[in-house]
Image (tube, rainbow, N blue to C red):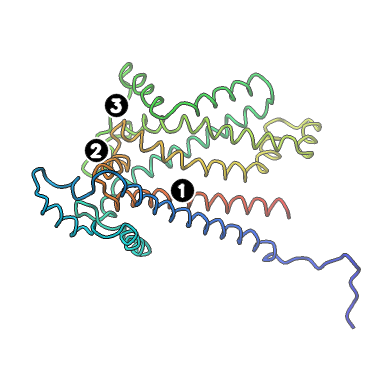
Amino acid sequence: MTALRPAGVHPPRSVPARVLPGAGRVARQAARRLLMLLVLLAAVFAAVEILPGDAAGATSDRGVTAADLTARRAAMGLDRPVAERFWDWMTGLPTGDLGTTARGQHVTDVLAGPFPNTLLLGVLALALSTAGALALGGWAALRPGGRTDRTVDTLSTAAFALPEFVVSVSLLLLLSQWTGWLPAVTLTGADGRPESWTMIVLPLLSLTLPQIGWNTRIVRGALADQAALPHVRAAVLDGLPRWRILGHHMLPGALPAVTVGIATSTGMLLGGTVVVETLFNYPGIGAVLAGAITDRDTPLVAGVVAAAGATISLLLLLADLVRTTALGEQHR
């Protein structure tokens, strides 16, 4: 005989029942970002198409005849509709084929050297800016409304408001021209990497300082929301040390918002990378992208955007996973 269950009492939910909604949310986010990346790539093809000139003319020698240009356009497929060329390029993406540049090279070969250099610079800048933001944001959160909090808020706003090229020029004058402590430009070795670690310091600082400003505001805002919660107020009334309150009561709850906020800022970070690399002659995708736009090289421009977009999408997906996991732990 089946036992009766009291009204309003439900059997305990299994772990998969709790996890699946979060997993479904992450899957939807991944699909949405993939769709946004595809739309962005289509916009890249359209944008390069409306620029004056084309790849055939931009990469041809001087004095070439009109007949030769026509033949070159036909050989490069530029006489076909842009939608058809975009579709052909997209069909190669699943196999890792990013097409061929206007100068006859495989796009993957062109990006094989510079993209890891850019990725190294971006990862280091993201790590340093995150560490700096956590330290400054936590320091300010321990003294809400005080002089430290106001100072951190002012400095972080000023750092974020400064464009990367202003920071780069200022650091170049201070640390290279006036003091001679660091090299002004990056020299590339035979392997395509900077010859010395000192050559990466100025580009790294130029990217990190503005990002610290932005990420500090993200961390400070998330910690301020946590400080208003009852369990944090209770910890303060109990007289617990400030750093213990920060590490054990505020930071775990702020982690989802901090993770997503910092991951979202990677788009700005990679955008600033192009500017910084150009200023310091750093061997990254900045110079590749500039040259590709000059050559009206649509596959190469799209390849750079695809590589950067995939990197950003992966970081955002990881942030969603961290957020979903953290929220799941908090609701157990």
| Quadrant, the N terminus | bottom right
On the image, the x and y values in percent for residue 125 come to 44, 37
Disc ID at residue 183: 3
Q: Reading the chain from its start, which is encountered first: label 2 or label 1? A: 2
Residues tagged 3 and 1 counted as in contact (Cβ below 8 A): no
Residue at numbered disc 2: 188
Q: Residue at left 75%, top 35%?
A: 228
Look at the numbered discs 2 and 1 and tell me whether their residues touch, using CB distance below 8 Å. Answer: no
Side of 180 where 234 appears, left or right: right
Q: Residue furthest top?
A: 178
Q: Nearer the viewer, residue 58 or 157?
A: 58
Give the secondary structure at mark 3.
loop
The picture quadrant where one finds residue 67 is bottom left
- Residue type of the residue flagged with mark 2: Thr
Give the residue at mark 1. Answer: 312
Residue 285 drawn above or below residue 73: above
Tag 1: amino acid: Ile
